[in-house]
Amino acid sequence: MKKKFDLNPIIKTLQKVLPQAQKSIALHEPQFDGKEWAYVKKCLDSGWVSSVGKYVSLFEKQLAEYTGIKHVIAVVNGTAALHICLQLAGVRAGDEVLMPTLTFVATANAVSYCGAVPHFADSDEKTLGLDPLKLGDYLKDITELRTEGCFNKKSGRRIKAVVPMHTFGHPVDMEPLLDVCQKFGLVLIEDAAESMGSLYKGYHTGSWGRLSVLSFNGNKIITTGGGGAILTNDTSLPALAKHLTTQAKLPHPWAFNHDLVGYNYRMPNINAALGCAQLEKLPEYIRQKRALALRYQEAFTGIEGVKIFKEADFARSNYWLNVLLLDKEYSCERNKLLELTNNQGIMTRPSWTLMHKLIMYEDCPRMSLACAEDLERRLINIPSSAVLTDLNIVNSTFTEERQG
Ligand SMILES: *Cc1c(COP(=O)(O)O)cnc(C)c1O
């Protein structure tokens, strides 16, 4: 089975696409080339740096306009946003919540914060996200519908919700997943932490779930330093979301009264100021990142043993992180390729360790996870910063001039 395989053409192709840099090329770097300094200065000058101030509501309004989702609540990070969404969805201690095993640990941790149990589902090769058809078949086998909801016949626990995640920016196939949710009475919460700016059938990711989540961590397509948002079209939810994220304090000019166990999860004004500036640049970043993805796809055409992952027909991806997939028979070369590229100053990394392999989640319920396990063996993320496109345009004209 194991063929002799030359990794050099892969390295050469990466070097051809990427600018010749003095230092190593990061996987994903933030860019602050807009009005960041101006807005942050205004924020400091105003004295309102914390959870009250005009940038928080401005950022929320602009996010709602950009995504087309009615209500936005800005919070301290994406993980906190997930925690609140699960609570608002009615997830309680002892429930199970479905999610892909191929995700970042935050998706599973947020479920644990609720005292609930992650239940791991397989991935779809076409999207790298949750496979809705496989999930539907599996639930048919293992669940029982009662008046109180959908129950796992094996564990006896209620399955309350499903959290698909748009992996590396690529939208999950949402329509069949909506059917599954309807059939089994599951609340849909989208983890869109990586897919700001990605569309499914023309609508922003996050538009399909009852609730959804964005992240503005330093490594995401736009950043507020740390930050996240809860999004929903359901008018009954935003007031409670805001209340829960601000210590459940009852409004009063001086008295401190609280009617729930709340959280200090509100996004500070200074982070929101950064966010407003970043959001202005987002369309340009998406254009640059899609151009970089196309360049990778073209450069790797005809290179043996690998493919660059491409968005599905129904998707317009932000290409947050580009994915290089080794052919199945060459998966044994993954670690070697990781080592060679990192040694050459091209930062690459494997997928996250699958959730069901982490020590705290190894006993959680799961279906057969064959596709996710196969993807984990073959998947490598390659440098994807928006800025890499334009540097390279400068670079290639420069080379042409020198050659011509
Ligand atoms: C980044 C990320 C989160 C959480 O975001 P933070 O803002 O870092 O808390 C959640 N889920 C996924 C899939 C992510 O990539």
Image (cartoon, rainbow, N blue to C red):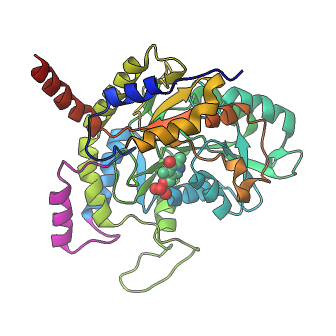
Report how many numbered discs are placed on residues in the image: 0
Q: Is residue 298 magenta?
A: no
| Quarter of the picture holding the N terminus | top right
Q: Based on the displayed image, in which of its 4 quarters is residue 209 positioned?
A: top right
Direction from residue 36 to residue 94 in the image, left or right = right
The quarter of the image holding the C terminus is top left
In the rendered view, tell whether residue 250 sits above or below residue 146: below
From this view, report whether residue 226 is shown above or below residue 383.
Answer: below
Q: Is residue 43 magenta?
A: yes
Q: Which residues are magenta?
A: 30-53
Would residue 359 be seen by someone viewing this image from the given angle?
yes
**Residue that extends furthest to the top in the rendered view of this protein:** 302
Residue 331, image x and y in percent?
A: 63, 30
Q: Position of residue 42 (x, y in %)?
A: 16, 65
Q: Is residue 265 left or right of residue 279?
A: right
Residue 327 vertical placement versus 106 (above, below): above
- Asked whether the viewer can see residue 208, the reply is no
Q: Is residue 209 left or right of residue 185?
A: left
In terms of depth relative to the viewer, which is nearer, 165 or 59?
165
Residue at 49% across, 26% down: 309
> Residue 256, position in %: x, y?
45, 84
Comparing 215 with 207, the one in front is: 215
Image quadrant in which you'd find residue 115: bottom right
Q: Residue at x 27, y 34 (%)?
A: 19
Residue 199 image position (x, y, % from top left)? 43, 30
Side of 145 relative to 347 (left or right): right
Q: Which residue does the image show at 31% across and 62% down from the upper left?
A: 271
